[in-house]
Image (spheres, rainbow, N blue to C red):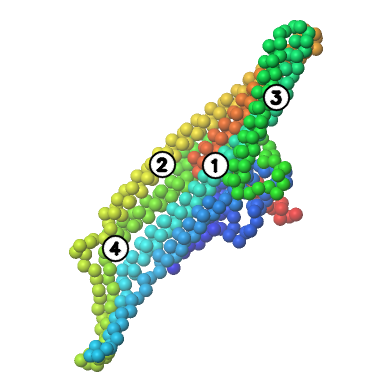
Amino acid sequence: MADTTAYEHERLGQDMFSRTGYRLRRDDDASTLPPGIDVSDGVSRDEAVAIALWNNRDFAVTLGELGVGRARLADSGLLTNPILSLLFPLGPKQLEFTIGIPFESLFLRSQRIDMARADCERLASLLQRHGLDLIRDVSLAYIDHDLAERRAELATDALGLANERAEAARLRVEAGETSRVLYDTALADAERARCEVLRRTSAARELGERLMTWMAWRPPNASIPLHTARQPTIPTIPETPDLLTRALAARPDLRAAEFAAEAASRAAGLAHRDWLTVSALIDANGSGSQGFEIGPGFTAAIPIFRQGTAAIRDAEFKLALTRYASIRQSIEADVSLFSLGCDQARQLLERLSTKLRPAVVARFEGLRLQIAAGQEAEDATLPARGELLQVDIDLAEADANLRRAIVRLEHACGSSLGAQRQADAVERALATEGDS
Protein backbone atom coordinates (compact mmCIF):
# COMPACT_ATOMS: atom_id res chain seq x y z
CA MET A 1 0.00 0.00 0.00
CA ALA A 2 1.29 3.48 -0.88
CA ASP A 3 2.30 5.81 1.98
CA THR A 4 -0.27 8.61 2.56
CA THR A 5 1.13 10.15 5.75
CA ALA A 6 2.38 13.25 3.90
CA TYR A 7 -1.25 14.19 3.17
CA GLU A 8 -2.73 13.59 6.60
CA HIS A 9 -4.61 16.39 8.34
CA GLU A 10 -1.85 17.14 10.85
CA ARG A 11 0.84 17.59 8.20
CA LEU A 12 -1.42 19.85 6.15
CA GLY A 13 -2.22 21.90 9.23
CA GLN A 14 1.48 22.41 9.91
CA ASP A 15 2.00 23.61 6.34
CA MET A 16 -0.89 26.07 6.61
CA PHE A 17 0.37 27.34 9.96
CA SER A 18 3.90 27.95 8.68
CA ARG A 19 2.53 29.64 5.56
CA THR A 20 -0.08 31.92 7.11
CA GLY A 21 0.11 31.68 10.91
CA TYR A 22 -3.39 30.15 11.09
CA ARG A 23 -4.46 26.67 12.16
CA LEU A 24 -6.78 24.10 10.60
CA ARG A 25 -9.54 22.51 12.58
CA ARG A 26 -8.88 18.98 13.75
CA ASP A 27 -11.31 16.27 12.70
CA ASP A 28 -12.15 15.38 16.30
CA ASP A 29 -12.50 18.98 17.56
CA ALA A 30 -16.11 20.08 18.13
CA SER A 31 -15.31 23.57 19.41
CA THR A 32 -16.43 26.62 17.43
CA LEU A 33 -13.33 28.70 18.22
CA PRO A 34 -9.67 27.86 17.55
CA PRO A 35 -7.24 27.49 20.46
CA GLY A 36 -5.90 30.79 21.80
CA ILE A 37 -8.82 32.89 20.46
CA ASP A 38 -10.48 35.15 23.05
CA VAL A 39 -13.44 37.17 21.76
CA SER A 40 -14.36 38.77 25.08
CA ASP A 41 -12.43 41.91 24.14
CA GLY A 42 -13.64 41.98 20.54
CA VAL A 43 -12.72 40.21 17.32
CA SER A 44 -9.60 41.40 15.53
CA ARG A 45 -8.90 40.74 11.87
CA ASP A 46 -6.51 37.90 12.64
CA GLU A 47 -9.09 36.34 14.94
CA ALA A 48 -11.81 36.67 12.28
CA VAL A 49 -9.62 34.87 9.75
CA ALA A 50 -8.72 32.12 12.24
CA ILE A 51 -12.39 31.57 13.06
CA ALA A 52 -13.30 31.41 9.36
CA LEU A 53 -10.64 28.78 8.63
CA TRP A 54 -11.91 26.85 11.65
CA ASN A 55 -15.62 26.91 10.73
CA ASN A 56 -16.06 27.56 6.99
CA ARG A 57 -17.85 24.57 5.46
CA ASP A 58 -16.65 25.13 1.89
CA PHE A 59 -13.10 24.83 3.17
CA ALA A 60 -14.08 21.64 4.99
CA VAL A 61 -15.34 20.25 1.66
CA THR A 62 -11.88 20.82 0.16
CA LEU A 63 -10.39 18.87 3.06
CA GLY A 64 -12.80 16.06 2.24
CA GLU A 65 -11.70 16.04 -1.40
CA LEU A 66 -8.13 15.56 -0.28
CA GLY A 67 -9.32 12.59 1.79
CA VAL A 68 -10.63 11.03 -1.42
CA GLY A 69 -7.22 11.64 -3.00
CA ARG A 70 -5.51 9.86 -0.10
CA ALA A 71 -7.82 6.88 -0.58
CA ARG A 72 -6.97 6.77 -4.28
CA LEU A 73 -3.27 6.89 -3.50
CA ALA A 74 -3.64 3.97 -1.08
CA ASP A 75 -5.64 2.05 -3.70
CA SER A 76 -3.07 2.69 -6.45
CA GLY A 77 -0.49 0.54 -4.68
CA LEU A 78 -2.73 -2.52 -4.45
CA LEU A 79 -2.33 -5.38 -6.91
CA THR A 80 -5.17 -6.47 -9.17
CA ASN A 81 -7.09 -9.46 -7.86
CA PRO A 82 -6.62 -12.84 -9.62
CA ILE A 83 -9.53 -14.00 -11.77
CA LEU A 84 -11.03 -17.48 -11.33
CA SER A 85 -13.05 -19.03 -14.17
CA LEU A 86 -14.91 -22.27 -13.34
CA LEU A 87 -16.81 -24.50 -15.79
CA PHE A 88 -19.04 -27.13 -14.15
CA PRO A 89 -19.26 -30.73 -15.42
CA LEU A 90 -22.69 -31.22 -17.02
CA GLY A 91 -23.31 -34.22 -19.24
CA PRO A 92 -20.16 -35.07 -21.17
CA LYS A 93 -18.58 -31.74 -20.11
CA GLN A 94 -15.68 -32.18 -17.77
CA LEU A 95 -14.86 -29.98 -14.77
CA GLU A 96 -12.53 -27.15 -15.86
CA PHE A 97 -11.19 -24.07 -14.15
CA THR A 98 -8.75 -21.30 -14.98
CA ILE A 99 -6.91 -18.84 -12.71
CA GLY A 100 -5.65 -15.63 -14.33
CA ILE A 101 -3.05 -13.43 -12.64
CA PRO A 102 -2.68 -9.96 -14.30
CA PHE A 103 1.02 -9.36 -14.82
CA GLU A 104 0.71 -5.77 -15.99
CA SER A 105 -0.38 -4.69 -12.48
CA LEU A 106 3.07 -5.67 -11.25
CA PHE A 107 5.25 -3.64 -13.58
CA LEU A 108 2.81 -0.69 -13.86
CA ARG A 109 2.31 -0.40 -10.09
CA SER A 110 5.04 2.19 -9.51
CA GLN A 111 3.73 4.40 -12.33
CA ARG A 112 0.22 4.29 -10.91
CA ILE A 113 1.50 5.19 -7.43
CA ASP A 114 3.52 8.11 -8.81
CA MET A 115 0.49 9.38 -10.73
CA ALA A 116 -1.79 9.13 -7.67
CA ARG A 117 0.84 10.81 -5.47
CA ALA A 118 1.13 13.72 -7.94
CA ASP A 119 -2.66 14.06 -7.85
CA CYS A 120 -2.55 14.14 -4.02
CA GLU A 121 0.08 16.87 -4.18
CA ARG A 122 -2.19 18.79 -6.53
CA LEU A 123 -5.16 18.46 -4.17
CA ALA A 124 -3.03 19.47 -1.18
CA SER A 125 -1.86 22.56 -3.07
CA LEU A 126 -5.44 23.40 -4.02
CA LEU A 127 -6.37 23.10 -0.34
CA GLN A 128 -3.69 25.66 0.52
CA ARG A 129 -4.95 27.88 -2.28
CA HIS A 130 -8.52 27.63 -0.99
CA GLY A 131 -7.23 28.59 2.44
CA LEU A 132 -5.40 31.63 1.02
CA ASP A 133 -8.53 32.64 -0.90
CA LEU A 134 -10.57 32.42 2.30
CA ILE A 135 -7.98 34.47 4.21
CA ARG A 136 -8.08 37.14 1.50
CA ASP A 137 -11.89 37.27 1.35
CA VAL A 138 -12.35 37.43 5.13
CA SER A 139 -9.61 40.06 5.47
CA LEU A 140 -11.17 42.25 2.77
CA ALA A 141 -14.62 41.82 4.33
CA TYR A 142 -13.20 42.80 7.72
CA ILE A 143 -11.49 45.91 6.29
CA ASP A 144 -14.67 46.91 4.47
CA HIS A 145 -16.69 46.55 7.66
CA ASP A 146 -14.10 48.42 9.69
CA LEU A 147 -14.12 51.28 7.17
CA ALA A 148 -17.93 51.31 7.14
CA GLU A 149 -18.00 51.69 10.93
CA ARG A 150 -15.47 54.50 10.73
CA ARG A 151 -17.51 56.22 8.00
CA ALA A 152 -20.62 55.91 10.20
CA GLU A 153 -18.74 57.56 13.10
CA LEU A 154 -17.56 60.40 10.87
CA ALA A 155 -21.07 60.80 9.44
CA THR A 156 -22.33 61.27 13.00
CA ASP A 157 -19.65 63.93 13.54
CA ALA A 158 -20.71 65.57 10.27
CA LEU A 159 -24.32 65.63 11.49
CA GLY A 160 -23.26 67.39 14.67
CA LEU A 161 -21.34 69.95 12.62
CA ALA A 162 -24.33 70.48 10.31
CA ASN A 163 -26.58 71.09 13.33
CA GLU A 164 -24.12 73.67 14.64
CA ARG A 165 -24.11 75.42 11.27
CA ALA A 166 -27.90 75.47 11.25
CA GLU A 167 -27.96 76.95 14.75
CA ALA A 168 -25.38 79.59 13.77
CA ALA A 169 -27.47 80.48 10.72
CA ARG A 170 -30.59 80.81 12.87
CA LEU A 171 -28.84 83.22 15.21
CA ARG A 172 -27.64 85.32 12.25
CA VAL A 173 -31.15 85.46 10.83
CA GLU A 174 -32.60 86.55 14.18
CA ALA A 175 -29.88 89.21 14.44
CA GLY A 176 -30.75 90.43 10.95
CA GLU A 177 -27.28 89.71 9.65
CA THR A 178 -28.40 87.40 6.83
CA SER A 179 -31.49 86.23 4.95
CA ARG A 180 -33.80 83.32 5.73
CA VAL A 181 -32.44 81.47 2.69
CA LEU A 182 -29.14 80.79 4.45
CA TYR A 183 -30.97 79.22 7.39
CA ASP A 184 -33.15 77.04 5.13
CA THR A 185 -30.05 75.88 3.29
CA ALA A 186 -28.37 74.95 6.58
CA LEU A 187 -31.48 73.02 7.68
CA ALA A 188 -31.44 71.10 4.37
CA ASP A 189 -27.74 70.31 4.86
CA ALA A 190 -28.47 69.01 8.36
CA GLU A 191 -31.24 66.78 7.08
CA ARG A 192 -28.95 65.47 4.35
CA ALA A 193 -26.32 64.70 7.01
CA ARG A 194 -28.94 62.85 9.05
CA CYS A 195 -29.79 60.69 6.02
CA GLU A 196 -26.10 60.04 5.51
CA VAL A 197 -25.83 58.73 9.08
CA LEU A 198 -28.67 56.29 8.43
CA ARG A 199 -27.12 55.17 5.17
CA ARG A 200 -23.66 54.64 6.65
CA THR A 201 -25.04 52.84 9.70
CA SER A 202 -27.06 50.47 7.50
CA ALA A 203 -24.02 49.80 5.32
CA ALA A 204 -21.92 48.94 8.39
CA ARG A 205 -24.56 46.48 9.61
CA GLU A 206 -24.83 44.84 6.20
CA LEU A 207 -21.07 44.44 5.91
CA GLY A 208 -20.98 43.05 9.44
CA GLU A 209 -23.52 40.39 8.45
CA ARG A 210 -21.44 39.54 5.39
CA LEU A 211 -18.35 39.14 7.55
CA MET A 212 -20.22 36.85 9.94
CA THR A 213 -21.27 34.72 6.96
CA TRP A 214 -17.64 34.35 5.88
CA MET A 215 -16.67 33.42 9.44
CA ALA A 216 -19.57 30.94 9.79
CA TRP A 217 -19.80 32.05 13.41
CA ARG A 218 -21.72 34.56 15.50
CA PRO A 219 -20.67 36.04 18.84
CA PRO A 220 -22.76 34.85 21.78
CA ASN A 221 -23.12 38.48 22.82
CA ALA A 222 -24.35 40.81 20.05
CA SER A 223 -22.57 43.74 21.72
CA ILE A 224 -19.10 42.25 21.12
CA PRO A 225 -17.31 44.56 18.67
CA LEU A 226 -15.65 43.24 15.56
CA HIS A 227 -12.40 45.04 16.19
CA THR A 228 -10.01 45.82 18.98
CA ALA A 229 -7.62 48.14 17.17
CA ARG A 230 -7.96 50.13 13.97
CA GLN A 231 -4.25 50.63 13.37
CA PRO A 232 -2.65 47.23 12.66
CA THR A 233 1.06 46.67 12.35
CA ILE A 234 1.97 47.13 8.69
CA PRO A 235 4.54 44.51 7.65
CA THR A 236 7.73 45.50 5.88
CA ILE A 237 7.22 45.01 2.16
CA PRO A 238 10.27 43.62 0.29
CA GLU A 239 11.30 44.73 -3.18
CA THR A 240 9.30 43.45 -6.15
CA PRO A 241 11.97 40.95 -7.39
CA ASP A 242 12.14 39.40 -3.91
CA LEU A 243 8.35 39.23 -3.77
CA LEU A 244 8.23 37.53 -7.16
CA THR A 245 10.81 34.94 -6.10
CA ARG A 246 8.79 34.30 -2.96
CA ALA A 247 5.54 34.00 -4.90
CA LEU A 248 6.91 31.54 -7.45
CA ALA A 249 8.15 29.35 -4.61
CA ALA A 250 5.06 29.60 -2.40
CA ARG A 251 1.97 30.00 -4.58
CA PRO A 252 -0.03 26.79 -4.10
CA ASP A 253 -1.95 27.13 -7.37
CA LEU A 254 1.36 27.17 -9.27
CA ARG A 255 2.45 24.06 -7.36
CA ALA A 256 -0.93 22.48 -8.11
CA ALA A 257 -0.43 23.21 -11.82
CA GLU A 258 3.08 21.77 -11.60
CA PHE A 259 1.85 18.56 -10.01
CA ALA A 260 -1.06 18.40 -12.46
CA ALA A 261 1.47 18.55 -15.31
CA GLU A 262 3.52 15.83 -13.61
CA ALA A 263 0.44 13.65 -13.18
CA ALA A 264 -0.53 14.25 -16.82
CA SER A 265 3.00 13.33 -17.91
CA ARG A 266 2.88 10.08 -15.98
CA ALA A 267 -0.61 9.35 -17.28
CA ALA A 268 0.64 9.92 -20.83
CA GLY A 269 3.54 7.54 -20.24
CA LEU A 270 1.17 4.97 -18.80
CA ALA A 271 -1.24 5.40 -21.70
CA HIS A 272 1.43 4.33 -24.16
CA ARG A 273 1.40 0.96 -22.41
CA ASP A 274 -2.19 0.65 -21.23
CA TRP A 275 -3.07 -1.52 -24.20
CA LEU A 276 -0.72 -4.14 -22.81
CA THR A 277 -2.77 -6.58 -20.76
CA VAL A 278 -0.90 -9.81 -20.03
CA SER A 279 -2.21 -12.37 -17.57
CA ALA A 280 -0.61 -15.62 -16.48
CA LEU A 281 -2.97 -18.56 -16.62
CA ILE A 282 -3.25 -21.84 -14.77
CA ASP A 283 -5.66 -24.09 -16.66
CA ALA A 284 -6.95 -27.38 -15.24
CA ASN A 285 -9.61 -29.90 -16.06
CA GLY A 286 -10.98 -32.83 -14.18
CA SER A 287 -10.80 -35.68 -16.67
CA GLY A 288 -8.38 -35.29 -19.49
CA SER A 289 -6.72 -38.08 -21.43
CA GLN A 290 -4.32 -38.54 -18.54
CA GLY A 291 -6.95 -37.98 -15.84
CA PHE A 292 -6.69 -34.69 -13.92
CA GLU A 293 -4.65 -32.22 -16.03
CA ILE A 294 -3.20 -28.83 -15.20
CA GLY A 295 -0.88 -26.52 -17.13
CA PRO A 296 0.36 -22.93 -17.46
CA GLY A 297 -0.41 -20.34 -20.13
CA PHE A 298 -1.07 -16.68 -20.71
CA THR A 299 -3.50 -14.25 -22.35
CA ALA A 300 -2.56 -10.98 -24.01
CA ALA A 301 -4.44 -8.26 -25.84
CA ILE A 302 -3.57 -7.89 -29.54
CA PRO A 303 -3.34 -4.13 -30.32
CA ILE A 304 -4.80 -4.22 -33.83
CA PHE A 305 -7.66 -1.73 -33.61
CA ARG A 306 -6.87 0.36 -30.56
CA GLN A 307 -3.46 1.26 -29.19
CA GLY A 308 -4.61 2.83 -25.92
CA THR A 309 -5.39 6.46 -25.07
CA ALA A 310 -1.91 7.86 -25.70
CA ALA A 311 -3.07 10.65 -28.03
CA ILE A 312 -5.61 11.89 -25.50
CA ARG A 313 -3.13 11.80 -22.62
CA ASP A 314 -0.48 13.59 -24.68
CA ALA A 315 -2.96 16.39 -25.41
CA GLU A 316 -3.87 16.61 -21.72
CA PHE A 317 -0.18 16.90 -20.84
CA LYS A 318 0.31 19.78 -23.30
CA LEU A 319 -2.77 21.48 -21.84
CA ALA A 320 -1.36 21.10 -18.32
CA LEU A 321 1.91 22.73 -19.41
CA THR A 322 0.01 25.62 -20.99
CA ARG A 323 -2.05 26.07 -17.82
CA TYR A 324 1.14 26.12 -15.73
CA ALA A 325 2.66 28.84 -17.96
CA SER A 326 -0.56 30.87 -17.76
CA ILE A 327 -0.66 30.75 -13.95
CA ARG A 328 3.00 31.73 -13.72
CA GLN A 329 2.42 34.71 -16.00
CA SER A 330 -0.61 35.74 -13.92
CA ILE A 331 1.46 35.55 -10.71
CA GLU A 332 4.15 37.81 -12.15
CA ALA A 333 1.51 40.37 -13.20
CA ASP A 334 -0.32 40.24 -9.84
CA VAL A 335 2.83 40.67 -7.75
CA SER A 336 3.99 43.65 -9.80
CA LEU A 337 0.54 45.28 -9.76
CA PHE A 338 -0.18 44.82 -6.06
CA SER A 339 3.34 45.80 -5.05
CA LEU A 340 2.89 49.06 -6.96
CA GLY A 341 -0.54 49.48 -5.34
CA CYS A 342 0.96 49.08 -1.86
CA ASP A 343 3.62 51.67 -2.60
CA GLN A 344 1.12 54.21 -3.95
CA ALA A 345 -1.34 53.64 -1.09
CA ARG A 346 1.43 54.06 1.48
CA GLN A 347 2.62 57.32 -0.13
CA LEU A 348 -0.91 58.76 -0.14
CA LEU A 349 -1.52 57.77 3.49
CA GLU A 350 1.77 59.32 4.59
CA ARG A 351 1.02 62.51 2.64
CA LEU A 352 -2.42 62.86 4.18
CA SER A 353 -1.29 62.11 7.73
CA THR A 354 2.00 64.06 7.78
CA LYS A 355 1.28 66.98 5.45
CA LEU A 356 -2.39 67.75 4.85
CA ARG A 357 -3.93 66.97 8.23
CA PRO A 358 -1.31 68.92 10.25
CA ALA A 359 -1.86 71.90 7.95
CA VAL A 360 -5.64 71.79 8.45
CA VAL A 361 -5.23 71.37 12.22
CA ALA A 362 -2.88 74.35 12.31
CA ARG A 363 -5.44 76.46 10.47
CA PHE A 364 -8.14 75.35 12.90
CA GLU A 365 -6.00 76.19 15.94
CA GLY A 366 -5.16 79.58 14.43
CA LEU A 367 -8.85 80.41 14.05
CA ARG A 368 -9.46 79.40 17.67
CA LEU A 369 -6.75 81.82 18.79
CA GLN A 370 -8.32 84.60 16.70
CA ILE A 371 -11.74 83.89 18.24
CA ALA A 372 -10.21 84.03 21.72
CA ALA A 373 -8.66 87.38 20.81
CA GLY A 374 -12.00 88.69 19.55
CA GLN A 375 -10.80 88.95 15.95
CA GLU A 376 -13.26 86.39 14.56
CA ALA A 377 -16.86 85.37 15.22
CA GLU A 378 -17.67 82.32 17.37
CA ASP A 379 -18.65 80.21 14.34
CA ALA A 380 -15.51 81.03 12.35
CA THR A 381 -14.06 77.55 12.96
CA LEU A 382 -17.01 75.72 11.36
CA PRO A 383 -15.52 75.66 7.80
CA ALA A 384 -12.16 74.49 9.16
CA ARG A 385 -13.87 71.75 11.17
CA GLY A 386 -15.68 70.63 8.03
CA GLU A 387 -12.40 70.52 6.14
CA LEU A 388 -10.78 68.56 8.98
CA LEU A 389 -13.69 66.11 8.93
CA GLN A 390 -13.20 65.56 5.20
CA VAL A 391 -9.49 64.95 5.73
CA ASP A 392 -10.33 62.32 8.36
CA ILE A 393 -12.64 60.64 5.84
CA ASP A 394 -9.85 60.66 3.25
CA LEU A 395 -7.45 59.23 5.85
CA ALA A 396 -9.85 56.40 6.67
CA GLU A 397 -10.21 55.58 2.97
CA ALA A 398 -6.44 55.70 2.41
CA ASP A 399 -5.77 53.49 5.44
CA ALA A 400 -8.32 50.94 4.20
CA ASN A 401 -6.86 51.04 0.69
CA LEU A 402 -3.37 50.33 2.03
CA ARG A 403 -4.61 47.42 4.11
CA ARG A 404 -6.53 46.04 1.10
CA ALA A 405 -3.43 46.34 -1.08
CA ILE A 406 -1.36 44.43 1.49
CA VAL A 407 -3.97 41.67 1.71
CA ARG A 408 -4.01 41.29 -2.07
CA LEU A 409 -0.22 41.34 -2.23
CA GLU A 410 0.03 38.63 0.43
CA HIS A 411 -2.48 36.55 -1.50
CA ALA A 412 -0.45 37.05 -4.69
CA CYS A 413 2.71 35.96 -2.84
CA GLY A 414 1.06 32.82 -1.48
CA SER A 415 1.88 33.54 2.17
CA SER A 416 1.53 36.23 4.80
CA LEU A 417 4.30 38.82 4.88
CA GLY A 418 4.13 38.60 8.66
CA ALA A 419 3.31 34.90 8.93
CA GLN A 420 6.28 33.97 11.10
CA ARG A 421 5.65 36.84 13.51
CA GLN A 422 1.99 35.89 13.74
CA ALA A 423 2.78 32.20 14.20
CA ASP A 424 5.15 33.04 17.06
CA ALA A 425 2.45 35.19 18.69
CA VAL A 426 -0.09 32.36 18.50
CA GLU A 427 2.41 29.91 19.97
CA ARG A 428 3.10 32.29 22.85
CA ALA A 429 -0.64 32.68 23.48
CA LEU A 430 -1.13 28.93 23.56
CA ALA A 431 1.84 28.49 25.90
CA THR A 432 0.44 31.13 28.24
CA GLU A 433 -2.95 29.44 28.15
CA GLY A 434 -1.35 26.10 29.00
CA ASP A 435 0.57 27.56 31.93
CA SER A 436 -2.57 29.07 33.39
x%, y% of residue 201?
A: 66, 33
Say if mark 2 contacts mark 4, CB within 8 Å.
no
Look at the numbered disc 2 and give the secondary structure of its residue: helix
Q: Amino acid at mark 2?
A: Arg
x%, y% of residue 341?
A: 51, 31
> Which of pointers 3 and 1 lies earlier in the amino acid sequence?
1
x%, y% of residue 140?
A: 57, 38
Q: Quadrant of residue 388?
A: top right
Q: Amino acid at mark 4?
A: Asp
- Furthest toward the left, the residue is 304
Say if mark 3 contacts mark 2, CB within 8 Å.
no
Which residue is disc 2 drawn over?
328
What residue is drawn where x is 41% and y is 42%? 327
Which residue is disc 1 drawn over?
136
Which residue is disc 3 drawn over?
159
Tell us which disc is closer to us: 2 or 4: 4
Q: Quadrant of residue 248?
A: top left
Tell us which disc is closer to us: 2 or 1: 1
Look at the numbered disc 3 and give the secondary structure of its residue: helix
> Which of pointers 2 and 4 lies earlier in the amino acid sequence?
4
Tell us which disc is closer to us: 3 or 1: 3
Which residue is disc 4 drawn over?
274
Look at the numbered disc 1 and give the secondary structure of its residue: helix
Say if mark 2 contacts mark 1, CB within 8 Å.
no
Q: Amino acid at mark 1?
A: Arg
Label 4 crowding class (10 Å Cα cut-off): few <14, some 14-19, many 20+? Answer: some
What residue is drawn where x is 50% and y is 33%? 339
- Seen in the picture, residue 371 relative to 214 is either above or below; the reply is above
18 lies left or right of 244: right
Q: Is residue 28 in view from this perspective? A: yes
Q: Amino acid at mark 3?
A: Leu
Tell us which disc is closer to us: 3 or 2: 3
